[in-house]
Amino acid sequence: MTRLRQLTLTGVLLCVVMSVPVAATDSSYLPLEIGDRWAYSSDLVGPDIKEVVSGPNPVFGNSFMIRYLVSDHSPGLENHWTSNDEGDVYLHGFRRRNPRLAFFYDPPLKVVDAPLYPGKTWISAVDLATTPGGPSIGRYVVRYTVTQPESHIVEGVEIVAFGVMETTESEGVAGVGTEWLTDGRPSDSGKADPVVPHWWAPGVGEIQYRSIGIFHLVGFSLPRVANEASTWSDLKKLYR
């Protein structure tokens, strides 16, 4: 990456996450309220900026939609999520614009089985459809395995995140799990070395993820009403 590109990237991300000082500290591995926003950098392609733009939507299982506002590899990608009070995270499906395709899971994939700890494993078996509630085009079974925790620095704060591996235990359906990750991002599964696709931290969301390269969280904004909000210094205390 050239020096000019690095400076441009830094400027873009700083503009997006200027509201970082307010952040949630709940136990969910994916906070979900309209306006929640995350910004990521990568050494291979441009930044990713994604935001919760709508929800809960009964058509998509009362899920919240996260849209990629900025992305070289997945412009306009939309995926649908829910989480519960225990911290579990469910993926209901995704819709891409380029190429134009959409897949939905019934029941939704359980991508986080809280709490996470090294060696934990679970299986999520779902039917795959091209429309919400549509006819099944195949059965999809995924085994999830939690890896050792890693420390990540975000805006000067050390945050511990757990990696979650995804292993397809059924034949890939329509490229899901091979050409496409389960959330609709393009897969780099052709690499010789295995790469953890997701790193999760409670109260924050995805700290890192893979697609075309590895994306690192550089800032986030989780606006909350005053009596539910914590200061940035409060968040620091959780992870030190």
Image: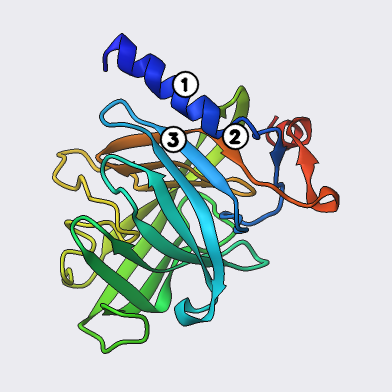
Q: CA distance from mark 2 to mark 3?
A: 15 Å
Q: Looking at the picture, which amino acid does disc 3 mark?
A: Tyr
Q: Looking at the picture, which amino acid does disc 2 mark?
A: Ile
Quick one: label 2, few (<14), some, or many (20+) residues within 10 Å?
A: many
Residue corresponding to mark 1: 11
Q: Position of residue 17 (x, y in %)?
A: 57, 33
Q: CA distance from mark 3 to mark 1?
A: 13 Å
Does 51 sit above or below residue 102?
Answer: above
Q: Secondary structure at mark 2?
A: strand
Q: CA distance from mark 2 to mark 1?
A: 23 Å
Judge left or right: residue 185 versus residue 235.
left
Image quarter where the N terminus lies is top left
- Quarter of the image where one finds residue 123: bottom left
Is any part of residue 185 visible from this angle? yes
Residue corresponding to mark 3: 40
Q: Secondary structure at mark 1?
A: helix
Does 195 sit above or below residue 21?
Answer: below
Residue ID at (52%, 63%): 113
